[in-house]
């Protein structure tokens, strides 16, 4: 039987991401938790949020968690709490979601980009020494797609230059490096609970985790109008509070995160096993001592766009994260970068393709995706 949907319109679509099976499995638990919040009539900065802060901090292996309204806010508030101000420079990878850079810009600071390692897509530590200046005030390291950056040399660099290190852990909750969880290496780490994340809310939400009581207290103040007492503000802040319904949803999902992570890793192993027979396509790389949580299963191909179209014609979803490196975004045209400045980030933007990945993805669906890729490679 043909698996080409043009020949067989009844063929099942395989979306790149699908939350429906998750809700089918845990909907009852979710509704019970939401009902609990509705009955309490406490909607902002209550018991659910406080409990979630403790649970997420424990998961990351740090002592404090501060819930905020999004991952982007987590980055802005963490940068601010680390002392970043207008005119400062912040080092960060050129290959990431735009929020990593725009959080820096939101404070009037300047993002200074660094290239990535081509095999992991994460910040290349050796770039830091080339890009640091006397105006550098902080470093953001991103754990892209669910894989930790090679963090030891980055921590050493930050320490030796007395620069605060912020982890953008939006995509990598639960991942590990040499047995230690991401989110525990920097002065502060930022999480996003955007619905498509491995731990996703039913709306926007985020958190900063840290071992520093000082940073955590500052973020508690900043997220709530700079208030240090009731209706007493000591500095300008934001309204970036985590709401109770999202916290309650996240607490339910947190109980399943380890199983979901296991399922993602098992799906990734199956993809990688099958892709070994397919030339010209590079599966993701998980270095020794790293635990990838496969927020994305991202391959690379020199014919990425044609491959994506081939998959789409067979009702197989895929996404390019991200088609434009930050230095070539119109947002940063004023920084004067040009093509060729960060070759590894640019090449990744042309070649990466994220395949269907979610815990409930079935092995027969993975086989169909790989078959379609193999068919493309043979053409
Ligand atoms: C790497 C990275 N940083 C920051 C963010 C921003 O998070 P949010 O969408 O919750 O603001 C995201 C998620 O979208 C992300 O993937």
Image (cartoon, rainbow, N blue to C red):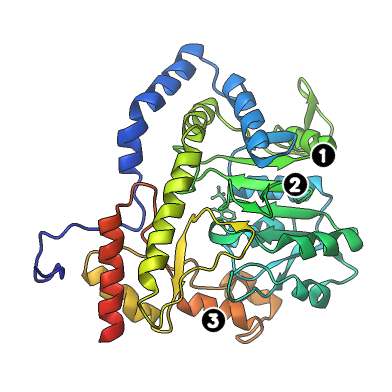
From where the camera sits, is residue 316 visible? no
Q: Mark 2 touching mark 3, by CB under 8 A?
A: no
Q: As drawn, is 291 to the left or to the right of 310?
A: right
Distance from the alpha carbon under mark 1 to that under mark 3: 38 Å
Secondary structure at numbered mark 2: strand
Q: CA distance from mark 2 to mark 3?
A: 30 Å
- Would you say 3 lies left or right of 240 here? left
Q: Nearer the viewer, residue 305 or 102?
A: 305
**Image mark for residue 276:** none
Of the numbered discs 2 and 3, the one sitting upstream in the chain is 2
Tag 3's secondary structure? helix
Quadrant the C terminus occupies: bottom left
Please, is residue 314 above or below residue 266 in the view?
Answer: below
Circle 1 sits in a helix, a strand or a loop, which is it? loop
Query: Quarter-wise, where is residue 47 in the image?
Result: top right
CB atoms at circles 1 and 3 under 8 Å apart?
no
Disc 2 to disc 1, C-alpha distance: 8 Å
* Residue 157 location (% of width, % of height): 84, 65
**What x and y, as percent, mark residue 242?**
59, 32
Residue holding disc 3: 347
Is residue 108 positioned above or below 50 on the image?
below
Q: Are marks 2 and 1 in contact (CB under 8 Å)?
A: yes
Query: Which residue appears at 69% of the width and 64% of the height?
Result: 150
Q: Residues within 10 Å of mark 1 (few under 14, many from 20)?
A: few
Q: Is residue 344 left or right of residue 273?
A: right
Q: Which residue is mark 2?
A: 188
* Residue at the disc numbered 1: 212
Q: Assess disc 3: are there few (<14), some (14-19) or many (≥20) residues with their C-alpha within 10 Å of its C-alpha.
A: some
């Amino acid at each position: 039987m043909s698996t080409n949907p043009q020949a067989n319109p009844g063929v099942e679509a395989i979306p790149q991401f699908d939350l429906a099976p998750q809700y089918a499995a845990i909907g009852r638990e979710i509704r019970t938790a939401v009902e609990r919040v509705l009955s309490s009539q406490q909607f902002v900065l209550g018991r659910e949020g406080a409990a979630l802060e403790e649970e997420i901090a424990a998961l990351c292996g740090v002592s404090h968690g501060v819930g905020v309204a999004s991952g982007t806010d987590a980055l802005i508030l963490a940068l601010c709490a680390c002392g970043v101000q207008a005119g400062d420079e912040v080092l960060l990878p050129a290959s990431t979601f735009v929020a990593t850079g725009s959080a820096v810009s939101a404070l009037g600071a300047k993002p200074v980009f660094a290239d990535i390692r081509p095999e992991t897509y994460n910040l290349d530590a050796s770039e830091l020494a080339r890009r640091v200046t006397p105006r550098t005030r902080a470093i953001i390291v991103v754990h892209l797609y669910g894989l930790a950056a090679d963090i030891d040399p980055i921590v050493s660099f930050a320490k030796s230059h007395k620069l605060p290190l912020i982890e953008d852990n939006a995509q990598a909750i639960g991942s590990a490096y040499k047995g230690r969880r991401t989110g525990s290496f920097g002065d502060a780490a930022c999480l996003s609970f955007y619905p498509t994340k491995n731990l996703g809310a039913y709306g926007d939400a985020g958190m900063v985790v840290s071992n520093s009581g000082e940073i955590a207290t500052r973020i508690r103040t900043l997220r709530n109008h700079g208030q240090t007492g009731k209706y007493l503000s000591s500095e300008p802040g934001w309204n970036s509070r985590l709401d109770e319904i999202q916290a309650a949803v996240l607490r339910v999902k947190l109980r399943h995160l380890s199983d979901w992570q296991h399922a993602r890793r098992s799906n990734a192993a199956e993809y990688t096993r099958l892709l070994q027979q397919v030339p010209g396509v590079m599966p993701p790389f998980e270095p020794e001592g790293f635990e990838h949580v496969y927020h994305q299963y991202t391959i690379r191909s020199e014919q990425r766009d044609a491959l994506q179209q081939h998959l789409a014609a067979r009702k197989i979803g895929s996404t390019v994260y991200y088609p434009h490196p930050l230095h070539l975004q119109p947002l940063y045209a004023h920084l004067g970068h040009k093509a060729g400045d960060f070759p590894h980030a640019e090449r990744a933007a042309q070649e990466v393709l994220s395949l269907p990945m979610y815990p409930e993805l079935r092995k027969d669906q993975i086989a169909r995706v790989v078959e379609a890729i193999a068919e493309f490679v043979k053409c």
